[in-house]
């Protein structure tokens, strides 16, 4: 071996050792065997990897507290270019590794895990939080397709997007009930709430995306440019790319919200009134949701400033007599000058609804307070040590034609054994507000119900809720209720094939095109990961 080659090998060894020490500052963990060692020759990547126990532990669990899977490393990017470099390296490597983007970790079944791979800590893109990557544009005169919009980094939380847009008198049209979620996270799933019947889910209100595909390519896509990728990514469960920026439609923000809660004892009446309020002929309400309350959950679920103590006592008494009651929740947005008009219209509308007489409750709050209504509840649960518990949630989309059967079999049947706590949501929305080109799948009926069993349990006693969820799914299957899971979790590819139905072949085609080695979002469990390119027929 000649001297120059020996010298080169020595320099390489020194460089490797140096990079190893850089990447492992503050701890003594060995280099993980599941990551290629030549990753250390890329200082732009290696210096941003975290191998310390604290970082790995945080990325090994999520809000669900049901699963645990440790990554080999956590990546803290300074820019989207860093993320692209990481993905491109894995794609080109003879030993590719899985990569998962993690926002706030609000998945409940380990969907943001990357066992033995790398979890990208998306929060690092925003310098640890704040509004650094949020830019609001009131109007773009050279392109009439775009009116007002906000460009938000995929790592940004919706609460920060809201604050930034409200400063300009604007706000997104569609929301989730909880705002401490990331833009990229909800757009990878759907993003639904009580506004969806009017504006569709959040994925139906996006103009443009910046996406890093599974090959490391950075692509700006929209309905007109790279449209196939655009529609695949929205609702695509992170399978085709990592969202690093989204251009989201805005509208003028209202100032106030008149917030109504109506109590029912009969589900059919409750559902009929909900469907009436979301019909095209009724344009009064901007938000409509509903919930089910068992007798033992009324006080714990509703102890808030909305109700007085006397109101809660009356509602609890009604629940004790009937066992289960239902709450229709609706809101109208308005500006302060329209207050008297809102009062008049609301009074007329309430006269036409069939809630229990004397059980209509109203409140008036700011628009910001209404949209951020869940945060106070979170803070209370945290103070009581009841936030970081297992959350074996089940979210279903149930066709209208079978919702009464669902009520009989689940609400009046299976759930009567339930003694956990947490909200149970049930409200209708409309298919025509969901773009059929998106990856998200929904029931094949014009009206379907979002049912969210958002229940919590103790760390030692959550298994019975998992059994209950299985009973509910089994009931639907046996009764022929053609539901779809929202925020789905399945353990076999055959279950995923059934979930996507006729959209499965297109989903696989997009995976092969944009993430051919199945590097991205392995925690969903849809495709073997990482894997070489395989023919469509193998899936």
Image (cartoon, rainbow, N blue to C red):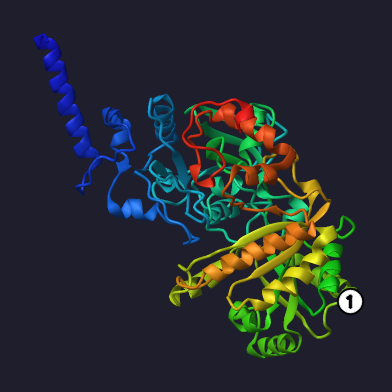
Q: Quadrant of the N terminus?
A: top left
> Seen in the image, is 360 located left or right of residue 513?
right
**Residue drawn at (50%, 30%) of the image:** 517
Tell me where residue 166 appears, x and y as whole percent: 60, 55
Residue 414 seen anywhere in this rendered image of the structure: yes
Residue 333 seen anywhere in this rendered image of the structure: no
Q: Which residue occupies the extreme left position in the image? A: 3
Q: Nearer the viewer, residue 69 or 241?
A: 69
Q: Nearer the viewer, residue 269 or 122?
A: 269
> Seen in the image, is 116 located left or right of residue 140?
left
Q: Which residue occupies the extreme top position in the image? A: 2
Question: From the viewer's perspective, is residue 410 above or below residue 157?
Answer: below
Question: From the viewer's perspective, is residue 306 above or below residue 122?
Answer: below
**Residue drawn at (18%, 23%) of the image:** 12
**Residue annotated with mark 1:** 351
- Crowding at label 1, few (<14), some or many (≥20) Cα neighbours within 10 Å? few
Tell me where residue 258 appears, x and y as whole percent: 73, 70
Q: Secondary structure at mark 1?
A: helix
């Amino acid at each position: 071996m000649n001297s120059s080659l020996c010298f080169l090998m020595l320099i390489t060894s020194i460089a490797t050792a140096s990079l190893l020490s850089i990447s492992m500052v503050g701890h003594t963990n060995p280099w993980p065997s599941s990551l290629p060692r030549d990753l250390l020759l890329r200082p732009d990547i290696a210096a941003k990897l975290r191998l310390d126990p604290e970082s790995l532990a945080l990325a090994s669990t999520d809000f669900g507290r049901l699963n645990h899977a440790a990554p080999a490393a956590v990546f803290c990017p300074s820019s989207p270019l860093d993320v692209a470099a990481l993905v491109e390296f894995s794609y080109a490597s003879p030993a590719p590794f899985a990569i998962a983007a993690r926002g706030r970790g609000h998945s409940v079944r380990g969907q943001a895990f990357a066992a033995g791979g790398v979890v990208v800590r998306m929060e690092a893109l925003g310098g640890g939080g704040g509004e650094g990557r949020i830019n609001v544009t009131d109007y773009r005169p050279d392109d009439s397709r775009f009116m007002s919009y906000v460009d938000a980094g995929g790592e940004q939380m919706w609460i920060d997007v809201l604050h930034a847009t409200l400063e300009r008198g604007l706000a997104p049209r569609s929301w989730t009930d909880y705002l401490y979620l990331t833009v990229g996270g909800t757009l990878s799933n759907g993003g639904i709430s009580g506004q969806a019947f009017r504006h569709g889910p959040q994925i139906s209100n996006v103009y443009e995306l910046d996406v890093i595909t599974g090959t490391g390519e950075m692509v700006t896509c929209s309905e007109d440019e790279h449209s196939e990728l655009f529609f695949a990514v929205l609702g695509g469960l992170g399978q085709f790319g990592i969202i690093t920026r989204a251009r989201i439609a805005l509208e003028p923000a209202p100032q106030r919200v008149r917030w109504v809660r109506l109590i029912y004892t009969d589900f059919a009446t409750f559902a009929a009134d909900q469907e009436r309020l979301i019909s095209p002929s009724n344009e009064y309400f901007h938000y409509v949701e509903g919930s089910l309350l068992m007798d033992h959950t009324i006080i714990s679920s509703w102890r808030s400033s909305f109700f007085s103590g006397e109101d809660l006592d009356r509602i609890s008494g009604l629940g004790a007599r009937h066992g289960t009651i239902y709450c229709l929740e609706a809101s109208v947005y308005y500006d302060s000058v329209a207050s008297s008009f809102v009062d008049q219209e609301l009074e007329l509308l309430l006269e036409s609804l069939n809630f229990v007489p004397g059980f209509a409750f109203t409140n008036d709050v700011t628009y910001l307070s209404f949209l951020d209504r869940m945060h106070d509840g979170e803070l209370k649960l945290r103070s009581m040590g009841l936030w970081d518990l297992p959350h074996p949630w089940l979210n279903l989309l149930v066709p209208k034609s079978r919702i009464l059967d669902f009520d009989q079999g689940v609400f009046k049947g299976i759930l009567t054994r339930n003694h956990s706590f947490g909200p149970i949501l049930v409200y209708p929305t409309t298919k025509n507000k969901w773009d059929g080109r998106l990856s998200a799948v929904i029931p094949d009926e014009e009206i379907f119900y979002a049912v969210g069993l958002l229940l919590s349990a103790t760390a030692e006693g959550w298994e019975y809720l998992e059994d209950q969820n299985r009973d509910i799914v089994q009931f639907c299957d046996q009764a022929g209720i053609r539901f779809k899971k929202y925020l789905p979790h399945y353990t076999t590819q055959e279950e995923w094939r059934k979930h996507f139905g006729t959209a499965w072949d297109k989903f696989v085609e997009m995976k092969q095109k944009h993430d051919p080695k199945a590097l991205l979002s392995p925690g969903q469990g849809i495709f073997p990961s990482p894997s070489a390119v395989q023919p469509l027929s193998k899936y």
